[in-house]
Amino acid sequence: MRIVVSGTHASGKSTLISDFRAAHPEYTVLGDPFDDVESGAPTGAASFVAQRRVTVSRLRESARESSVISERGPVDFLAYLTALEMLGRGDGALLSRAQELVETSMAHIDLVAVVPLDLRHPIDVPDDEDPALREAMESALLDALDDLERAGDAPPIVTLTGNPQERLAQLEMAAGL
């Protein structure tokens, strides 16, 4: 099973992946692409484009592996670029290319696990984490996944809710583990 864990920043993706890896050590973890990108503003279009490239490359390079869990997928960065547009901070020219890469890279994914913000289990973030972008990205991500699902261009998508243990159990069930 090739799983992508999607969600806005500070939504619980890293915790979920860490818990999943502890329970399923046979899985290869593709970590947050942000850790492998050095580009100016961490919440700028250039950073999101670079992270998208890293993500697409990792998914292609690991295509022969059957047990992979990735923190973020190409649709995450389409959502970030869309969110920047929504907030008046974007470059519309980047969106069409991002959309193309999302559609072609979905073939390398068996399951998208979405970790939305959860008011019952909040993760507080400081203002320098750009709360407006965080919320706009989540909205754009959910819309993009809905669009892909309606078009038949998406693998199965599961939305994980609750505390970390509940999210892990939901992911394991969706992955057939």
Image (cartoon, helix red, strand yellow):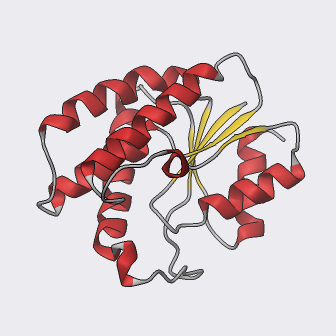
The N terminus, quarter of image: top right
Residue sitting nearer the eye, 121 or 129: 129
Measuring 12% from the left and 42% from the top, which residue is drawn there? Answer: 92
Residue 76 drawn at (x, y percent): 42, 46
Q: Is residue 49 above or below residue 120?
A: above
Most extreme residue toward the top, as rendered? 64
The C terminus, quarter of image: top right
Measuring 21% from the left and 37% from the top, which residue is drawn there? Answer: 95
Residue 129 drawn at (x, y percent): 40, 73
Is 37 on the left or on the right of 64, as rendered?
Answer: left
Measuring 53% from the left and 67% from the top, which residue is drawn there? Answer: 11
The image quadrant of residue 53 is top left
Residue sitting nearer the eye, 107 or 51: 51
Residue 83 drawn at (x, y percent): 25, 56
Residue sitting nearer the eye, 128 or 153: 128
Measuring 38% from the left and 30% from the top, which residue is drawn there? Answer: 102
